[in-house]
Image (cartoon, rainbow, N blue to C red):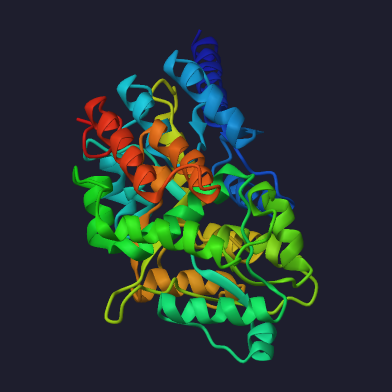
Amino acid sequence: MKRIIIAILVLVMLSAVVFCEGQKEKKITIKVWDQWSIPTDVKAIDLIQDKFFKEYPNIQIDRTGMTTEQIKNLILPAVGSGTGPDIIYPEADVGILAPLVKAKALLDLTDVWKKQWDNKLFLMSKEFTLLGNRAWGIGNELEFSPIYYSKSLFKQLGVTPPTLISDLEKILDTAKNANYIPITWGGRTWWMVSNYATYVLWAYMGKAETDKATLIGGTWKVPAAYEGIRTAFVKWVDNNYYAKDAMSLSFEETMMLLSQKKTAIFPGANAFVPQMMEVPDQDFASFLWPVPKKGQRTNTVTFCGSMYVVNASTKYPKEAIAYLDFILGTEYAARTWYEVADRVPPYKKPIPGLKINPLVGETLDVLLKGDADLTPAHNTVAPPEAVSWMTDGIGKVFLKQITPEEFIDQLDAFWQKGREEGLTRDSMK
């Protein structure tokens, strides 16, 4: 009898051990929608995930690559219905964020930021996800918006990077007289129009006025806004600073002009660095946007390429946060984003021996040194109708169908309407 009891006890213990081992080996799957499609981006996320799997062997990642537009169209019905993936990587703008927050479809990450991310990530990656003083995501692909130029071309023209708008105009005249297109810019790609108009407005208005207009219930009807639009889209058009067919040029066609060395300057953002690096014999450098008057401080447009958000209905919130913390908040991941993808991650701690593309390094310098004011881009903080008008209205100004004053007045009207509807950062409760 004793032998039988002992045998039974041994079997029970063995069963318990097997059960515990089975529990340890149980794996979960986190579904992710993201936008990584450029080969260098895909290589970077694959390398980072491979490292993640070694540290978290019980977590599987089911990653689906989608276009920006697909995610924009699918995110609200997918997450708002309580289904969809655990993590999504949409564009970082209030037009996407506000409906999701109102639908209570996102996990509130405010406390996670306080405990884990405030001390090791750039706070601008948090600011892009704020609504109602709560943080709803984590921004990646940090960007700023300088003016790019060819060092050899500037040397040939006998000019140097300017600090004043008036000095920039002298360079544009010199380039035009030498048969170069002064400014490479295209009006067929909506975000090129919106971004470029924002560069101009931010440079003329400065941070105080742009913050008032976008974040503190202010107005766009200020002299600096009228002057900026009048300068870039009336005066510079009349001065032939753009290609004759500028309004019909796409982003790809502006890149072609850049590669053919037919242009003096290219107002852009460091998001374009991977494409710029493909230009043969390129020797690009950049300078911050000039200011209208001496003594003014440069106000540069900043972006987060997109933001990671977590589905409020996820069954695995801790694991989802662990994934985000690893791919954006570790030295290994940050080094990979920099060195493999030429992207600027939100990780702000020093990375020993970092080998970084000089053009990407300029972005990091701006973020770390504080040589310029950093203000989120218009399309990331504006209500939907104002975002659309920034593109459509600028095209009408460029073609002389409306005046700069009419453009700004209508922009202001859309903003005030957005505030009434609770679709701006300063009106969302």
| Residue 285 visible in the displayed image | yes
Q: Residue at x 39, y 44 (%)?
A: 407
Q: Residue at x 58, y 57 (%)?
A: 271
Between 109 and 183, the one nearer to me in the picture: 183
- Tell me residue 421's x, y (percent): 26, 24
Between 13 and 394, the one nearer to me in the picture: 394
Tell me if 228 is positioned left or right of 220 in this view. Answer: right
- Tell me residue 32's x, y (percent): 57, 32
Vertical placement of residue 59 versus 160, above or below: above
Q: Residue at x 51, y 16 (%)?
A: 12
- Tell me residue 127's x, y (percent): 32, 49
Write down the quadrant of residue 152 in the picture: bottom right
Q: Residue at x 64, y 33 (%)?
A: 66
Vertical placement of residue 275 versus 87, above or below: below
| Image quadrant containing the C terminus | top left
Vertical placement of residue 218 versus 204, above or below: above
- Tell me residue 390's x, y (percent): 45, 43
Vertical placement of residue 159 versus 369, above or below: below
| Residue 55 visible in the displayed image | no
Between 173 and 55, the one nearer to me in the picture: 173
Write down the quadrant of residue 11 in the picture: top right
